[in-house]
Image (cartoon, rainbow, N blue to C red):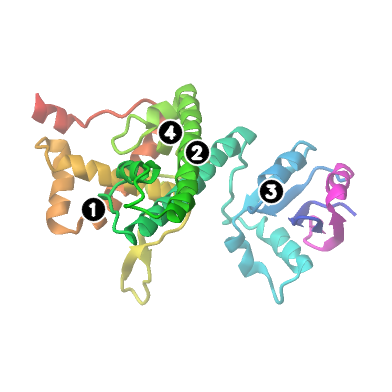
Amino acid sequence: MQVTTVGLDIAKHVFQAHGVDAGGRAVLRRKLQRAEVLTFFRGLSPCLVGIEACGTAHHWAREIQALGHEVRLMPASYVRPYVKRGKTDAADAEAICEAVTRPTMRFVPIKTPEQQAVLMLHRTRDLMVRQRTMLVNALRGHMAELGIVAPQGISRVADLVAVLLGEDETTMPKLARQALRGLAAELESLGERIDAIEAAILTWNKGNEASRRLATIPGIGPITASAIVASITDPTQFRSGRHLAAWIGLVPKQNSSGGKERQGGISKQGDRTLRRLLVLGATAVIRHVRTRSDAEASWLKGLLERRPAKLAAVAQANKTARIVWALLIRGGTYRVPAAAQAATA
């Protein structure tokens, strides 16, 4: 028995392995406990190992790769069509084993622990920002019931906190003040933790050469640049900037048949965090481009005259993604186009 390809269905405790030989015949079907996985692969000759790119997949890929095996990660949605019938761990492992050998299969590059750590900073920040928004909405809602309101914007929440910390019993009952002061204290503490995480992201951005170069692109700051560098392990996996934009989900969804082209909204494939950050950055570019008259802004201004602002923001985000690919592949920093330079000279 010479195993050449192994499909590994990973889980929290119970793993399933399916192996085939050079002729494609199944020669191995085995259920493994978590503690047995590395021992099992240590006893195998170097072979191709396929794993679905899901939780803990990058960790196991690094561990198995260190034992001399070739490990390839695949999106779970691309493996699902190879499941013949039913949903079992054994069927999933067999489907993974078959999918990893397909010549047209797309693979996910294995991330390093440093990249995963940076992404953890971003995910933690996103979670805390959502919690801060919930606290602000709760504070505004409760105080509005007592007739105390403040203008929109998180910076104006300080006006509500000032009323809350006051001692005027006529504006707010004592019990309400006691309840809402806890929300105000939690809001202040959460803001400090968010600032600490953002400082860590900025420090990492300054120490990473690729992230600093991406931050020179209009609409991309340190947070977006660091998220892109941490998410895209190998930019050469994309053949062009359009492929990167399609991976992020910034291209029209296709529903074409019978020679008729039908395009809908954006596909929303890929990384939703990168898509959101790029669209937010594009919105900032649009906000500043309205006051400019140089040639660089002419394309975006013309688009805004024909299309809604939100659609133009997605188009600008698509353009930004293509610029990101060019800088990652060719190096250098963002340069203003020659036509814009000539117009401003």
The part of the chain drawn in magenta is 19-43
Query: How far is mark 1 from mark 3, CA to CA?
Result: 37 Å
Say if 162 sits above or below 22 in the image. Answer: above
Q: Which residue is mark 1?
A: 312
In which image quadrant can residue 92 be found? bottom right
Query: How far is mark 2 from mark 1, CA to CA?
Result: 38 Å
Tag 3: residue type?
Thr
Q: Nearer the viewer, mark 2 or mark 1?
A: 2
Q: Residue 36: within the magenta? A: yes
Whether residue 248 appears in this view of the structure is no
Q: Which residue is mark 4?
A: 328
Q: Which quadrant: the N terminus?
A: bottom right
Task: Between residue 242 and residue 291, name the one nearer to us.
Answer: 291
- Residue 304: x and y in percent read 16, 53
Label 4 crowd bin: few (<14), some (14–19), many (20+), radius 10 Å: many
Q: Which residue is mark 3?
A: 56
Query: How far is mark 2 from mark 3, CA to CA?
Result: 31 Å
- On residue 281, which mark appears? none
Whether residue 74 appears in this view of the structure is yes
The residue drawn where x is 49% and y is 22% is 207
- Say which label, 1 or 3, has the lower sequence index: 3
Q: Which residue is mark 2?
A: 189
